[in-house]
Image (tube, rainbow, N blue to C red):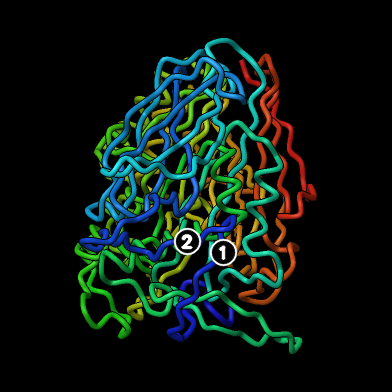
């Protein structure tokens, strides 16, 4: 590629704009305490509401207040909130950037639950309520529908009101899915926005720009501001209120291609260059602003299993926090999950009683994603190291996982990251490493970012790219939906088939794969 997606960072322009939200004004990125002596009429739910990580009896509900206030959640089986149940949540304060969450429980399995969030200040004033819905995980077999994608507000393409903002989220909201897996790069904290970008055809793209999006994120408040920015978009808020999310992170929540122990080379980082410090700030902001709970994560960070009834288990990976250096990827061994997470995945797949098992991997397996940040020609960002031979580097860890789970059937991997969509089939009959059972990996994205040409494939695990949809030039803007993508999975009511549609963000189906259940 003549232009690297992972090195493309647009120059900054500081200009703060506030986006109208349903007749109210979205608050700044950081909650501001009430001024002494000033009586506020009422607190405001500044960035909508969201739900995540469902269970058979409930889900996690997220909200943000523009001033210190108590979060109150009511739930009901009925849209008019008849027979509502009440949950008292945390006090939302600047300590968490005004954000908070509460897990609601005690609901019937396999049901659509209506929820209503209200804020109550210490003066007793109440916010206007906001409502949403989520679906509890089922106990009995039944049809399951989920979407997935990743890569939001990358490569300089922010909220452009002239094209309707982040309109892909509106399409997702209309899909009425049970779940949405956000495959990472939920924000581009290393991607400042310009007020305007001139396209190749002469048209001008105009971004909404905030202070936090005018420079690379280095402070905690800047990382918070990147999440805040995306959630000022009306499409994003409508989607978040109606679709339960399973969110994972990748690199751009911190900075491009980072790995533990790295010292960032980008000269824009003038305040802090240690990846471990920056990623700790990024992880705090991620947990504050996304509907995820550290309690549900195995290690208190990101990776976790979500059971969605007898037909589906979802294993959400963290391929960022425990990876080794991107340099010298062709060494004899390496790791991207780390020993503990790899063992957790192997044990989880082997013990799963669900018919279908989804592994949500934030980096692809057989697509070569190079990293030449430090001039290392062997630098690799993902798993595949590109020589079609026996496993080397991080491939050795994947080989062990595949070998130790080869008796497990009906495993499908879902990923994003590379900014195009593809259907990849892995088969030992055409692989250099053969000790595994064939499986599919599907790629989707970007949801709202620059689109890029398809990457090189590595034959170590016998990848066959059955379908790909990608531009031929780098960093194609999301001014049209043509190369913006999401995927949709449908499991039939008895679990007999697993259907995957690869779509553009208008909802057009580009390719369909129907996978029959293996016994």
Residue 255 location, quadrant: bottom left
Q: Residue at x 67, y 36 (%)?
A: 176
Disc 1 on helix, strand or loop?
strand
Which disc, if any, is residue 393?
A: none
Residue for badge 1? 20
Q: Do the residues labelled 2 and 1 touch (CB within 8 Å)?
A: yes
Q: In this view, does 252 lie to the left or right of 357?
A: left
Q: Quick one: quadrant of the C terminus?
A: top right
267 or 129: nearer the eye?
A: 129
Q: Quick one: quadrant of the N terminus?
A: bottom right
Q: Position of residue 51 (x, y in %)?
A: 47, 37
Alpha carbon distance from label 2 to label 1: 7 Å
In the rendered view, tell whether residue 1 sits above or below residue 66: below
> Would residue 92 be seen by someone viewing this image from the given angle?
yes
27 or 175: nearer the eye?
A: 27
Q: In this view, does 184 lie to the left or right of 502?
A: left
Q: Which residue is drawn at 35% across and 40% down?
A: 120
Mark 1 neighbour density, 10 Å: few (under 14) some (14–19) many (20 or more)? few
Residue 126 location, quadrant: top left
- Total labels: the figure holds 2
Residue for badge 2? 26
Q: Position of residue 323 (x, y in %)?
A: 30, 54
In the rendered view, tell whether residue 85 sits above or below residue 293: above
Q: Where is residue 140 in the image (x, y as percent from the top left)?
A: 57, 10
Mark 2 neighbour density, 10 Å: few (under 14) some (14–19) many (20 or more)? many
Q: Position of residue 312 (x, y in %)?
A: 54, 23
Q: Residue at x 76, y 41 (%)?
A: 512
> Would residue 393 be seen by someone viewing this image from the given angle?
no
225 or 339: nearer the eye?
A: 225
In the rendered view, tell whether residue 123 sits above or below residue 332: above
Disc 2 on helix, strand or loop?
loop
Q: Earlier in the sequence, mark 2 or mark 1?
A: 1
């Amino acid at each position: 590629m003549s232009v690297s997606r992972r090195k493309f960072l647009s120059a900054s322009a500081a200009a703060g704009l506030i986006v109208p939200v349903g007749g109210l004004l979205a608050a700044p990125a950081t909650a501001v305490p009430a001024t002494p002596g000033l009586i506020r009429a009422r607190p405001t739910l500044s960035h909508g509401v969201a739900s995540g990580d469902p269970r058979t009896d409930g889900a996690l509900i997220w909200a943000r207040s523009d001033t210190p206030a108590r979060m109150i959640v009511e739930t009901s089986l009925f849209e008019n909130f008849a027979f509502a149940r009440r949950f008292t949540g945390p006090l939302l304060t600047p300590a968490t950037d005004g954000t908070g969450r509460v897990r609601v429980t005690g609901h019937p399995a396999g049901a659509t639950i209506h929820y209503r969030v209200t804020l109550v200040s210490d003066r007793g004033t109440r916010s206007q309520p906001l409502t949403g819905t989520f679906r509890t995980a089922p106990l009995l077999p039944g049809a399951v529908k989920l979407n997935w994608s990743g890569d939001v507000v990358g490569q300089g393409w922010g909220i452009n009101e002239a094209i309707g903002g982040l309109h892909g989220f509106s399409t997702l909201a209309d899909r009425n899915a049970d779940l949405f897996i956000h495959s990472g790069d939920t924000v581009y904290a290393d991607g400042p926005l310009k007020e305007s970008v001139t396209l190749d055809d002469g048209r001008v793209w105009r971004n909404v720009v905030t202070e936090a999006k005018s420079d690379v994120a280095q402070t905690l408040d800047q990382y918070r501001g990147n999440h805040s920015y995306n959630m000022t978009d009306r499409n994003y808020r409508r989607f978040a209120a109606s679709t339960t999310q399973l969110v994972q992170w990748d690199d751009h929540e911190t900075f491009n291609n980072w790995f533990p122990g790295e010292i960032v080379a980008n000269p824009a980082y003038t305040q802090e260059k240690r990846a471990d410090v920056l990623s700790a700030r990024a992880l705090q902001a991620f947990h504050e602003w996304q509907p995820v709970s550290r309690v549900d994560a195995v290690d208190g960070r990101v990776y976790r299993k979500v059971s969605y009834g007898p037909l589906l288990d979802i294993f959400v990976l963290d391929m960022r926090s425990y990876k080794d250096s991107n340099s010298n990827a062709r060494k004899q061994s390496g790791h991207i999950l780390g020993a503990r997470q790899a063992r957790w995945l192997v044990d989880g797949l082997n013990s799963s009683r669900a018919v279908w098992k989804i592994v949500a991997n934030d980096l692809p397996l057989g697509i070569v994603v190079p990293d030449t940040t430090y001039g290392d020609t062997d630098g690799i960002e993902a798993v595949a190291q590109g020589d079609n031979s026996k496993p080397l580097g991080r491939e050795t860890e994947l080989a062990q996982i595949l070998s130790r789970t080869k008796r497990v059937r009906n495993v499908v991997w879902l990923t994003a990251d590379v900014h195009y969509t593809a259907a990849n089939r892995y088969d030992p009959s055409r692989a250099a490493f053969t000790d595994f059972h064939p499986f599919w990996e599907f790629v989707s994205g970007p949801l709202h970012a620059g689109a890029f040409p398809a990457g090189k494939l590595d034959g170590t695990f016998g990848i066959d790219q059955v379908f790909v949809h990608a531009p031929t030039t780098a960093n194609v803007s999301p001014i049209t939906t043509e190369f913006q993508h999401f995927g949709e999975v449908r499991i039939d009511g008895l679990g007999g088939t697993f259907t995957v549609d690869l779509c553009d963000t208008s909802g057009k189906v580009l390719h369909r794969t129907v996978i029959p259940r293996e016994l």
